[in-house]
Each structure stands twice: as C-alpha cells, then as structure tokens.
Image (spheres, helix red, strand yellow):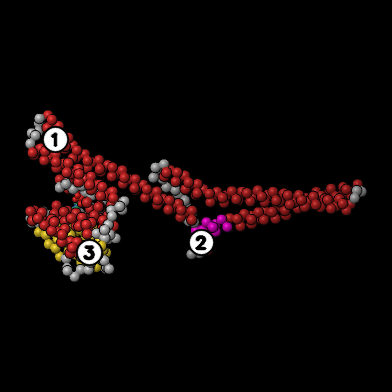
C-alpha cells in the first residue's frame, strides 16, 4: 500500500495532517502578511519620527516608541489575517470529517424509525467510510429480515385461510342442511383440523429452529442406529404405495456426533417427501458414506424431480414447486427449511440436486464424525 493510500484509509493520519496543514497555512500567511505590511507600517512611523525630530522633542524615546508601535502593528495585522485564514481552513477540514458522521447519525435515526431502506453515501476510504459500509450492510440485513417477517405473516395467513374456509363452508352446509351430518362430512372437518394442527406444530418448530433454540442431545451414535429405524417406520407406507425402498449403510461406517431424535426427524421429512413425490413403481434409496471427516447421507428418488429454477428456493419457508399437489398431500412447505436448520445446528450441510422435472431428485446432508 502506497503512503498516499495509507493516509486516505486512516482517519488518524487525516486528522494529524489537517492540524499540520492549518499550522503551515497560519505560519505562511503570518509571514506573508508581515512582509507585505512591514514597509507600509515602517514608512508611516518614519514620517511620524521625522515630524518629532523637527519639533525637537526627545529623539531617543520617540524613536523607540515609534519602532515598537510599528512592530506591534505588523504583528497585529499579520496575526489577525493568519487567524482568519486558519479558521477558514479549519472549518473546511472539520466539515469534511464531520459531514459523513452527521450522515451516519441521520441514517441510524431513520433505521430506528423503521425505514430500513435508508443507506448512507460516504465516499471516503478511511475508518468513517468503513463504518458507513458496515452501517449499510446492517441496514440491508435489517431490511431483509423485515421483508421476511412480512412474507411470513402473509404466508401464515394464506396457509390458515384454506383449511379455515373449508371448515367454515362445511359448518355452514351442516347448519343449512345442505350437507348430511354423516361421518364423511365430519372426517373432512377432522382432516382440515389435523392440517391446522400440523401447520401450527411446524411453525413452532420453525420459529425455534430459526432462533437456534432447538436443544440438541448429541452423542456418539452409529450410522445404522440413526438411519435404519427411520426407514423401518415408513417401510409399510412405501409398500402400500408400491415404491421400492433400499438402504445402503455400510457396517464399517464410523460413529457420528448427533442427536438421534433430530436426525430421525430430518430423515422422516426427506423419506416422506420422496414417498410423496415418487409415483407407484418408482424407487427410493438411502445411502450413507464417509468423506472428509464427515458422514454423508443421501435420499435419492426416481420421482417428479425438481426443475433447475426451483432448486435454489427449495429450502425457503413455504416454498413449494407444485402448490396444489403439496397442499393436497398435507405439506406446509416448511419441512425442508426445518430439516436444513436441524442439520446446520449439527454443523452439517444440506443440499438438493435434480437432473430436471420427471428425472428424480437427491437430497444429501452431512454430519460430523464423533472422533
Ligand atoms: P412440503 O411439506 O410441502 O413437502 P417441504 O419443505 O418438505 O414441504 O418441501 C418443499 C417443496 O420441495 C415441496 O413442496 C416440493 O415441491 C419440493 N420437494 C421436496 N422434496 C421433493 C422430492 N423428493 N421430489 C420433488 N420435489 C420435492
């Protein structure tokens, strides 16, 4: 970094140099004004001296007094001009330093008032410029959080509307006598109530996961102990639908450091999705292997697949590729969001891949090894 760049990036250097500049300007102006005014002042006092000589008054005393007066006048005038110029230069340099700080104060007041779109424009490259940049990053993060909050409220309202409208419609039908009070009608209501309960449960999980408040009971646990029970739990549902389910978890895999309950929850979500989005006759496989001090678990299906434009959003809350299909299956669109949070709470990663629509998809996550 060149000395000039170093000065540009350091407020300390800028302050130091501005003081030096003010001192230099004051000295130069002082010297210049003194030089300029000397002959005028001395000439006037020589004339006064000559007048005193002609009148025959005390020559030595007059000479001395006149010289002192001339010097005082020179110092006075030069000093005044130097102070004036130093004040002007100081105002200019102080303004250059204070203006960005005032912009930051105004910006933070706007942010405090909820105007998260506010940004400050500071061109300097020093610490104040860095502070402005950090401020803008903070404003951006707050704006995003606020946008997500509003989206969440909108999404929750939307998710609640469908089952509530359905329940209300059924109730009105029952009251008006349009619908028969039989078990099919009540089962429909029960189904919608169950969906609402699931949504509320998922939302609670989501808020706790996003706040990092899901307690993890981590311990050293064998990969098969993690994976096989989850597969067993859904086995009959796969059989009922006619989707083949295979498991490939080598016995030699080292233990992982994980909360078995939470990993089972992630696996059930991935396997449940694979089952839901794979038509009868398809295949789902669960594979686990070791790579770079991590255990990787992949759930692969030969189902609907995911188009490339949807893949980057698949872990966002309430994101569904096919809204009606997911909703009909009881999906709230937040299962994957929760799963990714759970994996990340284990210091792992989770991602999805798909060659395209109709070509199946693979969801993979990693867990740290116990060692
Ligand atoms: P949902 O409860 O709606 O299934 P998820 O968060 O689990 O919510 O999944 C989000 C969306 O991702 C689903 O609505 C679906 O569109 C898509 N998706 C998830 N898993 C699969 C899969 N195995 N195959 C195809 N699409 C999937």
Give the vertical position of 326 relative to 11 (above or below).
above
Which one is earlier in the sequence, the residue at label 2 or at label 3?
2
Closer to the observer: label 1 or label 3? 3
Closer to the observer: label 2 or label 3? 3
SS assignment at label 3: strand
The residue tagged 1 is: 170
Residue 297 visible to an observer of this rendering: yes
Quadrant of the snapshot with the C terminus: bottom left
Query: Which of the 4 image quadrants contains residue 236?
Result: bottom left
Which one is earlier in the sequence, the residue at label 1 or at label 3?
1
Q: Nearer the viewer, residue 346 or 330?
A: 346
- Give the residue at x 18% y 61%: 227
The residue tagged 2 is: 6
Residue 58: image location, x then y, percent: 90, 50
SS assignment at label 2: helix
Q: Nearer the viewer, residue 3 or 44?
A: 3
Ligand 1 is within 8 Å of the C-beta of the residue at disc 2:
no
Closer to the observer: label 1 or label 2? 1
Local packing at callout 2 (Cα closer than 10 Å; few below 14, some 14-19, many 20+) is some
The residue tagged 3 is: 221
- Give the residue at x 18% y 63%: 225
- Give the residue at x 50% y 46%: 102
SS assignment at label 1: helix
Residue 333: image location, x then y, percent: 21, 49
Residue 63: numbered disc: none
Mark 2–mark 3 Cα distance, whole angstroms, equals 54 Å
- Is residue 134 found left or right of 144 in the rendered image? right
Which one is earlier in the sequence, the residue at label 1 or at label 2?
2
As for residue 203 lying within the magenta part, the answer is no
Q: Nearer the viewer, residue 166 or 106?
A: 166
């Amino acid at each position: 970094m060149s000395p000039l760049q170093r000065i540009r990036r350091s407020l300390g250097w800028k302050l130091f140099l501005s003081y030096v500049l003010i001192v230099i300007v004051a000295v130069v102006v002082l010297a210049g004004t003194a030089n300029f005014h000397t002959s005028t002042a001395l000439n006037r006092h020589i004339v006064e001296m000559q007048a005193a000589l002609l009148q025959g008054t005390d020559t030595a005393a007059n000479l001395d007094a006149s010289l002192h007066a001339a010097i005082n006048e020179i110092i006075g005038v030069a000093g005044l001009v130097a102070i004036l110029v130093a004040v002007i230069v100081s105002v200019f340099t102080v303004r250059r330093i204070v203006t960005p700080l005032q912009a930051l104060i105004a910006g933070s007041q706007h942010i405090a008032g909820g105007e998260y779109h506010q940004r400050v424009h500071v061109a300097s490259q020093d610490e104040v410029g860095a502070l402005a940049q950090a401020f803008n990053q903070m404003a951006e993060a707050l704006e995003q959080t606020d946008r997500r909050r509003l989206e969440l409220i909108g999404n929750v309202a939307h998710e609640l509307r469908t089952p509530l409208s359905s329940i209300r419609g059924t109730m009105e039908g029952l009251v008006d006598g349009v619908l028969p009070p039989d078990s099919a009608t009540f089962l429909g209501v029960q189904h919608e109530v169950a969906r609402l309960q699931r949504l509320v449960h998922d939302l609670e999980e989501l808020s706790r996961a996003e706040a990092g408040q899901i307690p993890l009971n981590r311990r050293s646990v064998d990969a098969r102990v993690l994976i096989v029970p989850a597969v067993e739990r859904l086995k009959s549902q796969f059989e009922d639908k006619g989707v083949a389910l295979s498991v490939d978890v080598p016995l030699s895999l080292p233990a992982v450091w994980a909360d078995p309950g939470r990993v089972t929850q992630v696996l059930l979500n991935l396997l449940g999705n694979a089952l839901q989005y794979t038509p009868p006759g398809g295949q789902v496989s669960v594979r686990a292997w070791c790579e770079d001090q991590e255990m990787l678990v992949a759930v692969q299906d030969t189902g609907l697949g995911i188009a490339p434009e949807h893949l980057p959003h698949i872990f966002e809350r309430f994101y569904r590729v096919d809204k009606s299909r997911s909703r009909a299956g009881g999906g709230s669109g937040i299962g994957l969001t929760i799963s990714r949070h759970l994996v990340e709470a284990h210091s792992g990663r989770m991602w999805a891949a798909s060659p395209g629509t109709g070509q199946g998809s693979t969801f993979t996550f990693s867990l740290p090894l116990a060692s």
